[in-house]
Image (cartoon, helix red, strand yellow):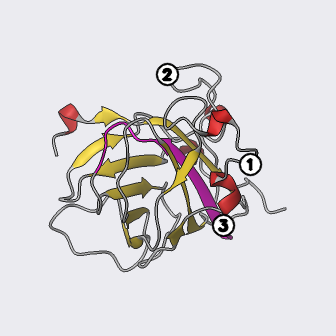
């Protein structure tokens, strides 16, 4: 993969089920595929330091209701665009942990798994929205860097980077298109500064 030709990923949004320091949570991740990708491609999620996906991470589809066209409305029939529904990443994804700071030829880490590599068993279609969840152990302390270090990548089945985040994955829909919000608190989420 040549980073010079990496295409920006679209519509990445991520929510967590828990903000507590050191607690376990599920991250709900949404994105639109920019390129069609073959079966056995990878979705890679990078987290800030001290977040941990584990050596064998746990990734899966969200609850079925997220993917349901509840009323059988026309807005759920379009494959792409604002009226399209969201799709699952497919059954039984294979998920393994790594550290995104690890150099290519260095040994696989035994702790601090800040990268989740999810091999999926479905084809991704251009412009289609997808969603999944993944389990993470939250960082044990707050850092402002946590608002800026969440990244999502799509890799080919051979492991080449194809699409990726140009800024931290945001917590809510963007208020403006383009550049990252000025305030770090409007970018992505972080653990609470103090225990509740």
Q: CA distance from mark 1 to mark 3?
A: 27 Å
Instruction: Specify the segment rendered in magenta.
Output: 22-37
Q: Secondary structure at mark 2?
A: loop
| Front position in the image: 168 or 193 | 168
Task: Identify the residue shown where x is 32% and y is 41%.
Answer: 163
Q: CA distance from mark 3 to mark 2?
A: 28 Å
Marks 2 and 1 in Cβ contact (< 8 Å)? no
Query: Is the residue 79 above or below the residue 154 in the image?
Result: above
- Specify which label sits upstream in the sequence, 3 or 2: 3
- Specify which label sits upstream in the sequence, 1 or 3: 3
Q: Position of residue 95 (x, y in %)?
A: 41, 71
* Image quadrant where one finds the C terminus: bottom right
Q: Position of residue 70 (x, y in %)?
A: 74, 48
| Front position in the image: 16 or 73 | 73
Q: Between label 1 and label 3, give the one nearer the viewer.
A: 1
Query: Seen in the image, is 117 located left or right of residue 65?
Result: left
Residue tagged 2: 179
Query: Is the residue 98 above or below the residue 79 in the image?
Result: below
Q: Secondary structure at mark 1?
A: loop
| Quarter of the figure with residue 114 | bottom left
Residue tagged 1: 70
């Amino acid at each position: 993969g040549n980073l010079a030709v990496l295409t920006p990923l679209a519509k990445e949004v991520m929510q967590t089920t828990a903000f507590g320091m050191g607690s376990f949570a599920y991250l709900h991740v949404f994105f639109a595929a920019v390129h069609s990708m073959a079966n056995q491609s990878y979705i890679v999620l990078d987290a800030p330091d001290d977040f941990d996906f584990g050596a064998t991470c746990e990734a899966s589809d969200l609850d079925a209701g997220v993917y349901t066209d509840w009323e059988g409305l026309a807005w759920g029939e379009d494959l792409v665009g604002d009226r399209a529904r969201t799709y699952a990443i497919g059954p039984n994804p294979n998920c393994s942990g790594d550290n995104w700071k690890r150099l290519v030829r260095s040994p696989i880490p035994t702790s601090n798994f800040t990268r989740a590599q999810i091999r999926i068993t479905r084809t991704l279609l251009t412009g289609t929205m997808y969603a999944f969840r993944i389990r993470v152990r939250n960082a044990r302390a707050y850092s402002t860097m946590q608002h800026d270090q969440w990244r999502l990548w799509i890799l080919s089945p051979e492991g080449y980077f194809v699409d990726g985040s140009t800024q931290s994955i945001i917590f809510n829909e963007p208020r403006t298109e383009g550049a990252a919000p000025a305030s770090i608190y409007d970018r992505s989420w972080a653990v609470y500064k103090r225990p509740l």
